[in-house]
Each structure stands twice: as C-alpha cells, then as structure tokens.
Image (spheres, rainbow, N blue to C red):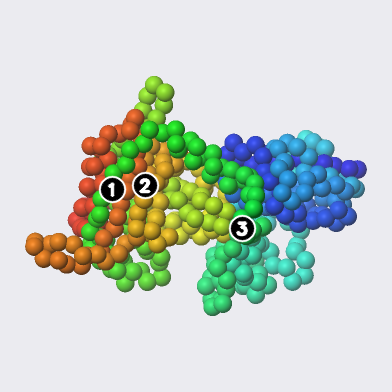
Amino acid sequence: MPRTFNLPDLGEGLTEAEVVEWLVAVGDTVTLDQEIVEVETAKASVVIPSPIAGVVEVLHAGAGDTVEVGSPLITFADADTESSSPGDDRVPNLVGYGATTEGSRRRRTGAKSVTAEVDPPPPGRPRAKPPVRKLAKDLGVDLSSVTPTGPDGTLSRGDVERAARRTADAPSPAPRGRPPGPVTPGTTIPLRGVRRTIAQHMELSHTIPAAAAWVDADASGLQSLRRALKDQYPDERITALSILCRLVVEGLREVPQLNARYGEDEITILPDVHLGVATATDRGLVVPVVRDAHTLTIRQLSAELARLVDGARANSLPPSDLVGSTFTVTNFGALGVDGGIPLINHPDVAILGMGALRDRPVADDGRVVIRPILPLSLAFDHRVADGAEAGRFLTLLAGWTQEPGLLLADRPPQ
C-alpha cells in the first residue's frame, strides 16, 4: 500500500527545511532507517533516514525547495506494513540528534511497541550509526578500512577519528551538500537556511542600543601559559582562544551584568555561562555553544571548542549545539584582522571580539620593548550595563592575559 512520509519536527522551534540532496530516486527500493535525504535548516544540515520501507514513488520537493514541517516529503509505493504502519508517527533517527540503542531499533505494530534487531549490513559495509557514517564521509575515511573497537563490532566516532589522524593525506572536513557557488557581478544569492538566519540576526542586532569599548592587552602571560600547557599536553589543541574563554568565564563571574537577558520590564542575570563562539564556515557565520562553560577547565574548554569548531565547519553539528548562548566570543584574529566592533548576538547582551595576537612595540618604564599584544573589544547592550561594567570587565581580562596563572591557581571552576 502507498505511504507518504512528511517532514518531521526537527526540534529547536524549526518550522521548515530546504532540500539539499536526495539520496534516493524514484523507483529505488528503500529499507527501514536507510538515509533518504539531506536537508538544511536555519541551524544545520540534517540527514533524514526513512521510517518506512518500500519503493519510492514520488519525491515531493526538489533540491533547493523549502518544505514546511508536516508537509509531504516522499511517498512510497508497496510500503512494507510489517516495518511501518499508517499510525507510525515516530520521528526518524536523525543525524546529530542521537541514535537508537546499539544493536536495536524501535518500531510500532498497531498499538504495541516492540524491539527488533538491526538488520545486518550488506557484505563489505561495516556496522555504524548514521552520524558515524557522516563523520567518516566528512573526514574522507573509508569505513571498510577501519577496525571497530565496540563490543558488538559497531564502529564508533573514536574509531573514525583515530583512522583520520593516521591517514596523512586525509582531507580536511568539508561540508556535505552544495558547495558555495562563485560570487561574481550579477550573481543572485537566495536568502535561505543559515544565510537567512544570519540576515535576521543582524537585523535584530541593530535594534539593540549598543556601546563599545576596547583595550590592547599584554598577552605575555597567556602565551607563556599556552606554551607550558602544550608542553605538558602535546596531543591536545590548546589555543590562545581557549585560554581567553576560560578568562572570560572568570570575568563574567565578576561582572555578571554581561551574562544576562533584557526583557521589557526586567533584566535577568543568568546563573550559568553558555559560551557562544562565532565560527566562519562555507555556509556563513555560525555560533556553536559551549554548554556550562563555567564548569570547564582550560583543557576541557579546548577539547569542546575543537569539537564544536570542527563540527561547524564540517556542517555536522545538530541544531541543539547552535542555540542558547548567554555570551559570545568572536575571533577576528583568525581572519588576520587586528580588531573590530562586533555585533551583539541576540538575545545575548554582550560580545567580546579578539583581534590578531601580534608582537608590537610598547613603552615599558621609559624603554621601548616588544610584547605580544592582544586587542580586545567589547560591544554591550547599554540598557543592561554601563561603561563602568564594560571597563571593569575589559580591565580584568587585560590583567589576566598578562598574569593568568595568579588567577587560575586559586580559582577553580564553579
């Protein structure tokens, strides 16, 4: 019997998605949980597996079309009613949204819910969940060459990541789907997906009565701490940005007005710090979020930043990793820019810009010396904080970048 699968609720308040690439065609026979389409939402790209087994009869949208949640996506002829039923309303196991339990999947038969064993993979195709397969594709890893370490012979993310590190010529993670086209005079770029979200956020940012302040910080101590940590932990990706993020958390503990929400009749000081980190990608600027940054050490922050930035650039993060910041950091220096005044990431009330860390001549007790200087700029909502709070926050950061050890030695994470 024919069955139509509608675009499921993708979470995070998303109401529509754009079809990036169909992974099946009319006439193909599809198995339960087989990946059928990649879509792009305002937050991220998602690969959708099929909750229905059958033969593809109709694709209700083409690449580039926008589909609303609940609208028809694909229709199957000869649908397998043993593995799906007209009342089956389960959300499929989406890439980046978690997965079914290892070795099993849920299905409904009438009103009862039963557990069925996962079908064995075709010959030569190793067992792996869809998110792991997508990670392997992004990293250029051939799964047939990877040895699984899981107790049931299933490949894990760690297996794929280790294989990528062992492959000297493995390509850098690249976003799946359509690469950005050439920008030439006369080109029309449609406002869709992430690009439309960026535009909407910029409009919101301009409604905030913002002010700005900046300081050139002597980063001698920060550089020394980074070198010491790299010597101690040579396999970890510890950067100046990750150390600065740790200092930002301490600064927000001292100046909590900058970690807040503005309402019509009230200002809410937030108890937890969820740190957004603006990241340039081929799809535009996105802001992955370090959850509970106030509980993390420098090493933990470094690991989480590496995961989020790599995932953002590989277009593999779920929407839940791209929402909910309470304060944002943007690194101009990664683009070779000395500094700038960033736009506030609504609904945050402040954002810190980090310029290029360069050796510069400075005056020191009547002498000209060379110091590593880190330009820091703060944009803040003047309805929530005043220049006094902004100045205190920047002054604290500047002092800690010169002598971070004194702070971190006596102040553990909250």
Q: Secondary structure at mark 1?
A: strand
Sequence order check: which comes first, mark 2 or mark 1?
1
What amino acid is labelled 1 in the image?
Answer: Trp
Q: Is residue 112 left or right of residue 384?
A: right
Q: Are marks 2 and 3 in contact (CB under 8 Å)?
A: no
- Find the distance from the CA under tag 2 to the CA under tag 1: 9 Å
User: Where does residue 273 sit, x and y in percent of width and height?
Assistant: 38, 43
User: Which residue is denoted by mark 3 in the rendering?
Assistant: 184
In the image, which disc is placed on residue 272?
none
In the image, which disc is placed on residue 341?
2
User: Where does residue 167 sit, x and y in percent of width and height?
Assistant: 56, 76
Sequence order check: which comes first, mark 2 or mark 3?
3
What amino acid is labelled 3 in the image?
Answer: Thr
The structure residue drawn at horizontal position 57% and vertical position 39%, both measured from the top left corner, is 12
Sequence order check: which comes first, mark 1 or mark 3?
3
Q: Secondary structure at mark 3?
A: loop
**Quick one: label 3, few (<14), some, or many (20+) residues within 10 Å?**
few
Q: Are marks 2 and 1 in contact (CB under 8 Å)?
A: yes
Q: Secondary structure at mark 2?
A: loop
Q: Is residue 41 visible?
A: no
The structure residue drawn at horizontal position 52% and vertical position 46%, both measured from the top left corner, is 322
The structure residue drawn at horizontal position 65% and vertical position 49%, both measured from the top left corner, is 188
User: Which residue is denoted by mark 1 in the rendering?
Assistant: 214
For the C terminus, the image quarter is: top left
**Quick one: label 1, few (<14), some, or many (20+) residues within 10 Å?**
many
Q: Is residue 381 visible?
A: yes
The image shows residue 145, relative to residue 7, as above or below, that is below
For the N terminus, the image quarter is: top right
Q: Nearer the viewer, mark 2 or mark 3?
A: 3
Q: Is residue 200 left or right of residue 385?
A: right
Relative to the observer, which residue lies in front, 238 or 396?
A: 396
User: Where does residue 81 sit, x and y in percent of width and height?
Assistant: 86, 44
